[in-house]
């Protein structure tokens, strides 16, 4: 049996959590740790995608004279055999790791600092939690990174969804957006970017954050949650997007040349969905058939292309312009039908 890998540490507490503080060569910490990157297909993991350039920048920096860094944040996942801690007195401890156990430390907040240091001997400081569960790691990660520049807001929203006690009522817009992404009958199924890795990455059309903000506009404009449940609202939103894909199949499938799936299009269409829902006045069911009939009257008259009426629009002003344009096309299409009748 091989002798254990040994790291001498100070044992203490970070607020209410027991932690180890120590120093070790970067390449050793790299060999013992891993980044638990969110897999959007299996919904496992919780961290952002690995950014190789970000990591290479740190590699270049840390090898310069007088370079330094704050402690790496790690966690020793619970295990009965992979590692053990031997307290040696006076706040000191010896961490012993079975060399056959592989990567036993999760990189809670250091994946880009360690990412390209597999061959670097430089000593780095670290703080290591002892036995946090994956959920507890996610909570720590979220707290550390909630204001981090460049961190995907959609990834943080995905964390919130997993940490929420009652997502449907606490954050209905996020609940509905995830329903669109997860329902196999949804045209958005697995096409919202959550901020992790996915085998369907090339098919993704909008971010989770964009969709939930657009849905929040719908919820505000309709006040649907005053009388109906978040689950019912999710079915209405799903019915609307199914109708969009039914009525505009070419524009939907060729999303790179049309605005339906781009931020301005998603926001604008959710505003139009609110118009259509409000027009039911609670008398007509706002189901797929209803939305198909309504959209069919004017949808094909709208120039949804990225080189047409809405070329280059963006931001809140762009959304207003898109909504006004679609509403105007709808009004003119209605007047034409009335005059022909």
Image (tube, rainbow, N blue to C red):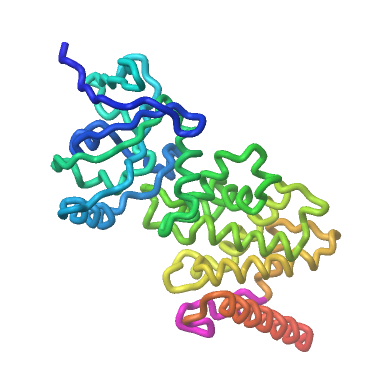
The quadrant in which the C terminus is found is bottom right
Relative to 54, 202 lies left or right: right
Against 91, residue 32 (above or below) is below
Up/down of 322 relative to 233, above or below: below
Q: Can you see residue 192? A: no
In this rendering, would 248 be left or right of 287? left
Most foreground residue, 134 or 226: 134
Snapshot quadrant of residue 218? bottom right
- Principal SS element in the magenta part? loop
The image quarter in which residue 285 lies? bottom right
Nearer to us in this view, 108 or 169: 108
Q: Position of residue 176 (x, y in %)?
A: 63, 51
Q: How many marks?
A: 0
Residue 325 screen position, x and y as percent: 63, 82
Q: Residue furthest top?
A: 1
**Position of 134 compared to 56: left or right?**
right
Q: Residue at x 42, y 38 (%)?
A: 45
Question: Which residue is at 43% across, 38% downward?
Answer: 42
* Location of residue 4 by image quarter: top left
Asked if residue 134 can be seen in this view, the reply is yes
Q: Does the segment drawn in magenta span residue 105?
A: no
Going 31% across and 37% down the picture, which residue do you hit? 126
Task: Pick the residue in front: 289 or 153.
Answer: 153
Q: Nearer the viewer, residue 323 or 239?
A: 323
Give how far across and how far down residue 173 sits, in percent: 64, 54
The segment highlighted magenta reads 298-311
What residue occupies the far bottom of the structure in this picture? 339
| Quadrant placement of the N terminus | top left
Q: Residue at x 30, y 15 (%)?
A: 88
Residue 310 painted magenta: yes
């Amino acid at each position: 049996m091989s002798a254990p890998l040994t790291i001498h540490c100070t044992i203490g507490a970070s607020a209410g959590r027991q932690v180890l503080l120590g120093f070790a060569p970067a390449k050793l910490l790299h060999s013992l740790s891993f980044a638990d990157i969110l897999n959007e297909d299996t919904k496992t993991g919780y961290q952002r995608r690995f950014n190789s350039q970000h990591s290479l920048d740190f590699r270049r920096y840390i090898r310069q004279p007088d370079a330094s860094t704050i402690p790496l944040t790690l966690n020793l996942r619970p295990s009965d055999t992979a590692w053990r801690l031997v307290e040696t007195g006076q706040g000191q401890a010896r961490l012993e790791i079975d060399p056959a156990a592989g990567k036993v430390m999760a990189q809670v907040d250091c994946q880009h600092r360690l990412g390209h240091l597999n061959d670097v001997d430089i000593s780095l400081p670290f703080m290591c939690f002892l036995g946090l569960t994956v959920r507890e790691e996610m909570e720590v990660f979220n707290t550390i990174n909630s204001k981090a520049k460049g961190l995907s807001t959609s990834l943080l929203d995905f964390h919130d969804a997993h940490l929420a006690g009652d997502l449907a009522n606490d954050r209905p817009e996020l609940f509905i957006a995830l329903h669109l992404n997860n329902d196999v009958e949804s045209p958005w199924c697995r096409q919202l970017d959550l901020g992790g890795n996915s085998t369907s990455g090339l098919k993704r059309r909008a971010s989770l954050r964009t969709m939930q903000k657009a849905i929040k506009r719908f919820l505000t404009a309709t006040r649907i949650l005053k009388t109906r449940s978040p689950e019912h609202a999710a079915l209405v939103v799903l019915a609307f997007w199914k109708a969009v894909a039914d009525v505009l199949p070419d524009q939907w499938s060729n999303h790179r040349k049309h605005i339906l799936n781009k931020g301005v299009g998603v926001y604008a269409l959710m505003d139009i969905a609110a118009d259509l829902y409000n027009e039911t006045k609670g008398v007509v069911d706002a189901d797929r058939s209803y939305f198909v009939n309504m959209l069919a009257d004017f949808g094909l008259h709208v120039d949804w292309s990225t080189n047409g009426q809405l070329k280059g629009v963006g931001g809140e002003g762009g959304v207003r312009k898109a909504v006004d344009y679609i509403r105007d096309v709808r009004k003119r299409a209605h007047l034409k039908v009335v005059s022909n009748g």
